[in-house]
Image: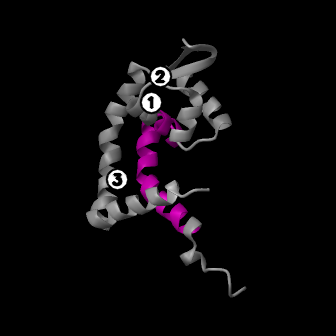
Amino acid sequence: MTDDIPLTSRSLPIALLRAREKLMGPIRQILADAGVTEQQWRVLRVLDEEGPQEPTRIANRACLLLPSLTRILQKLEEKSLIARRPDPRDGRRQIVEITREGLQIIKDNLPASLEATESIRSRFGADKHEKLLDLLNELHELDD
């Protein structure tokens, strides 16, 4: 073992992955029962929160690669959870919006998702939870 390599217990990428799994484990089952994937859920949440928008913006806001988003949008459209239409200002582009059915998926499953998240928050501590969010958002905002 090389002395200059941090232990996996002190590796930020591994710590972030472990924390993600801790949070997403219970939520995955909720989403599976609802018939959507984590990625589909993120797209629906972005569209619900921010309204109709172009796929590039959705990919950015939902932390997805554009090629992955293309497949996700196709599945969501097949399930009638989103609708796509040409951009009125530029017919080469499309605008994606959530449908009533998509909104219903969120309405039906958001309480259980929030309950799972709140369980972690309360066990972790509200102050530490808020501080962690602040630090992670600050890390995200660092210049590349």
Marks 3 and 1, how far apart at CA: 21 Å
Kindly state the secondary structure of the residue where label 2 is placed: strand
Marks 3 and 2, how far apart at CA: 26 Å
Residue 91 in the image: above or below residue 129? above
Q: Give the extent of the magenta segment.
A: 14-43
Label 2: how many Cα within 10 Å (few below 14, some 14–19, many 20+): many
Label 1: how many Cα within 10 Å (few below 14, some 14–19, many 20+): many
Give the residue at x 53% y 34%.
Answer: 58
Q: Is residue 94 left or right of residue 46?
A: right
Tell me the residue that label 1 is attached to: 47
Q: Quadrant of the C terminus?
A: bottom right
State which tag comes first along the sequence, 3 or 2.
2
Disc 1 residue type (three-letter): Leu
Q: Measured from the top left, where is residue 92 in percent x and y?
A: 66, 16
Q: Measured from the top left, where is residue 21 in percent x and y?
A: 49, 58
Residue 136 in the image: above or below residue 36? below
Pick whichever, 131 or 89, lies toward us: 89
Tell me the residue that label 3 is attached to: 117
> Magenta segment, principal secondary structure?
helix
Tell me the residue that label 2 is attached to: 97
Identify the image quadrant of residue 51.
top left
Marks 1 and 2, how far apart at CA: 6 Å
State which tag comes first along the sequence, 3 or 1.
1
